[in-house]
Image (cartoon, rainbow, N blue to C red):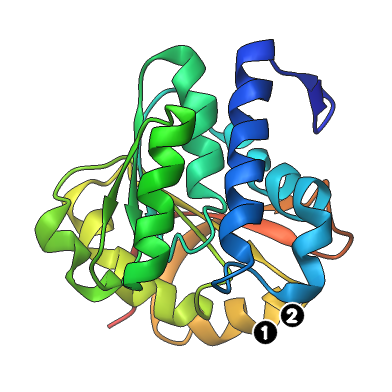
Amino acid sequence: MKLNGKTVSRETQERLDRFVAHFEKWARSINLVAPSTRQQIWDRHIADSAQLFSLAPEPRTWIDLGSGGGFPGIVTAILLAEAGEGWVHLVESNNKKASFLRTAIRETGARASVHAIRAETAPSEIAQAQLMSARALAALDDLFVYAVPWFQADPAFRAFFHKGRDYQREIDKARDRWTFDLIKHDSKVESGSVILEISGLAPAF
């Protein structure tokens, strides 16, 4: 099996297959992703999520905010399982979605744990990490409010945020309140979308 042009092992493919089956079962009763995209789970969600592992393949500790249906956090945790190192802290305040994520971890052996808390309180529970991800959670300016405690704790901390075609407006608005370094990675999955790699985040005043 190839994912974004890269071959994954049979074990990883089996983990991803188990996750998809688990996702489809739960998605019948709770809203895990937009209903219009449920039939595109491999191309629209898994491949999109897996782009992060190409950008940061080293086995590190991640924080995934607003994990919801498991994208990108569970996919990252499944890819880490093959290395046997690294971890993903899944932050999801919705209890039903948190239950889905816990059972997904058991089904797949993903290297992750679930924190059923709000993003605002996550820094007090998850003190140390190297990387952050979030997909379809909030505007960039709001994501920075959640993320800044980890940037202040570790100058090497980095965040990866999936954004759609209106990303430049979000960047411009965020620069009114924040200073940060930015690398824009064009999406390999959806034309016009990007993954924004953020480092050096700090309040502008």
Q: Secondary structure at mark 2?
A: loop
Question: Which residue is identified by label 2?
Answer: 166
Q: Describe residue 191's horizontal placement relative to residue 202 as left or right.
A: right
Give me the residue at 17% from left, 51% from top: 126
**76 with respect to 33 (left or right):** left
Farthest left residue? 124
Horizontal and vertical percent position of residue 49? 64, 47
Task: Report if the CB atoms under discs 1 and 2 are less than 8 Å apart.
Answer: yes
Distance, label 1 to label 2, CA atoms, is 6 Å
Q: Tell me the crowding category of disc 1: few under 14, some 14 to 19, or many 20 or more residues within 10 angstroms, Cα based.
A: few
Looking at the rendered structure, the kind of residue marked 1 is: Arg
Q: Is residue 38 above or below residue 9?
A: below
Locate the N terminus by quadrant.
top right
Query: Is residue 57 in sight in this rendering?
Result: no
Task: Decide which of 4, 26 is in the foreground and name it.
Answer: 26
Residue 9 location in percent, x, y?
68, 12
Three-letter amino acid code at disc 2?
A: Asp
Q: Image quadrant of residue 51? A: top right
- What residue do we see at 23% from left, 68% from top? 117
The quarter holding residue 168 reads bottom right
Residue at label 1?
Answer: 169
Q: Work out whether residue 44 or residue 20 is closer to the camera in this orientation and state it.
A: 20
Towards the viewer: 149 or 23:
23
Which part of the image, by quadrant, shows the C terminus? bottom left
